[in-house]
Amino acid sequence: MSLSLEAVDVEIVEARNLLAADKGGTSDPFAQVVLLDHEQNAIPKETYRTKAWKRTLFPQWEETFKLGDDTLPSVIVGSYIEVRVYDEDKGLGSSNDPLGIVNFPVKLLAKKNKLRCDAWFPLISTPAMTKADMMASGEVRLRCKLIGDTPAIFAELKEEASQLSHEGMIDARTEESVDEAHAKLYADKKPNELHIQLLKAHDLPVMDKAMLVGKGSGDPFVKFECLGATANSTTKKKSLNPEWNESFVLPVDDPAAVLEVWMYDYDLASAPDFMGCVQIPLDSCLDKLRHSSKLTLLDEQGVALPPSTSIIKKKDNNNTSSRPVSPSIPPLPSIEITLWWKYNPDLEDLLDMDLSDELKDEEIELKARKEDAIKRKEQLKQLKVIELQQAKEEFNRILLENKHQQYLDEMSTLQDEYAELLEEMKLNRIIQWEELNQLEPGEAYDNDKLDQRSKEPGYVSWEDFEIQYPPPPLTYSATTA
């Protein structure tokens, strides 16, 4: 009997809370979907990838791929679908960094008598990530559709799918959220990994006054601290209502731990200025579920910050309109955060591991590398200072050359104008001498006429003319700036 499963449509919709692999707390994520055979080997011609999204932990791919067109139905029935998420790196000599994978058997899609599946799947670490002490975070949303004769597909797959063990594989859950499923799976485990999603802040105090007009602004960033572990967000320039949508992961296994959230205003030339803080006891997150909160920022004495008097309207980025804030009840500065304190078995293994001599040697080597990196960074900084000084000197040299050339050009222009002025004065003197001797215009250059006229009474020679009628003092005003 021929099998009825012809192919599987897989739409890679989106992802959220991905691991930040690049500086600045973001990644350039893309996804790759692969059809694997029953031994988890890639089937030829059954690998596809999405485009890469730049500088985000929340990509929106919405790309669909058809798996199984070039594969026998008998192979598809026993196959696995694997979605691999990477951070794209196009640098010379570099490779794409893995951010996590999702892997489940095709048979599992028939478990609930549904042709379609639309669910969030948590990403798990790859062996390469575990070896490099990297832990996956976040989830990917998939829409899967079985293509073929529906009743026949269920008849062929349902019996086997119902016998599948959930241990070690991802179930396409549609009735419960990922965090609820996680809490049930590890109900007897103590959470040890805190996932923080920094969403946005509202109505922050003005830290930088406007130079001329406007109400001022700030350059806020957030620092998270818990049991010695820290994480910093990016800085949002000139905003009192910043939006981050950034994710962080801190190793935290103490039930009495408190997460400290510090808001600062970034200053280039001085230390950051305090903008507010809040402390969150994590005992409310022991249920391993996500908790979203909008928290009022406090001052350093634990008192709620006063409202920002400069804010009279609050704008919605998705709406060009503004909603007015009542002047009698101004909004208080606040921050929106989502926390998920979950259990990570890989992290527990790392926390319980005793340091061997080899690990101590690696720690010493890592420390030496860090010190070497700091030295190279300082050398690079000094080199940049030297290069900047050389660039300034070259700029001044070119500027001086340009000014010198401009001076030469101006002097040449002045000389030309001065020569023209002298020539004009000489012509005027000749005309004056001709009029004095009652000569016709141009006769001053006719020697015969001059000889004849010089014998007449009243004739004034040029030499006498220069003595009796000296030229006026020469005045000159440059026309060149």
Image: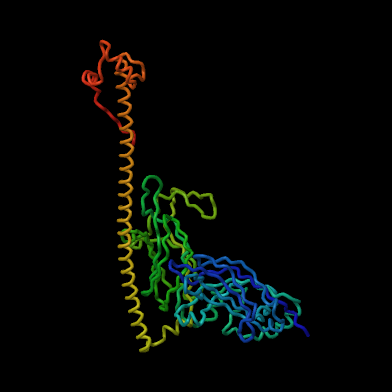
Residue at 53% in and 49% down: 321
The picture quadrant where one finds residue 226 is bottom left
Give the residue at the far bottom of this rendering.
Answer: 357
Q: Quadrant of the C terminus?
A: top left
Quadrant for the N terminus, please: bottom right
Whole-percent x, y for residue 150 in the image:
75, 76
Report the residue at 29% width, 17% height from top: 451
Q: Quadrant of residue 218?
A: bottom left
In this picture, is 380 found above or below 332? below
Percent across and percent down for residue 174 are: 62, 73
Q: Nearer the viewer, residue 15 or 241?
A: 15
- Looking at the picture, tell me which residue is in the foreground, 420 or 162: 420
Residue 445, above or below 256: above
Residue at the spot 45% in from the left edge and 59% down from the top edge? 201
The image shows residue 308 at horizontal and vertical percentages of 40, 52
**Lateral position of residue 97 relative to residue 358, left or right:** right
Give the residue displayed 41% in from the left and 83% down from the top: 351
The quadrant in which residue 106 appears is bottom right
Q: Residue furthest left?
A: 467
Question: Which residue lies most toward the top here?
Answer: 457
Task: Please identify the residue farthest to the right as the structure is shown.
Answer: 1
Q: Number of marks in the image?
A: 0
Q: In terms of depth relative to the viewer, which is nearer, 107 or 47? A: 47
Q: Position of residue 46 (x, y in %)?
A: 64, 77
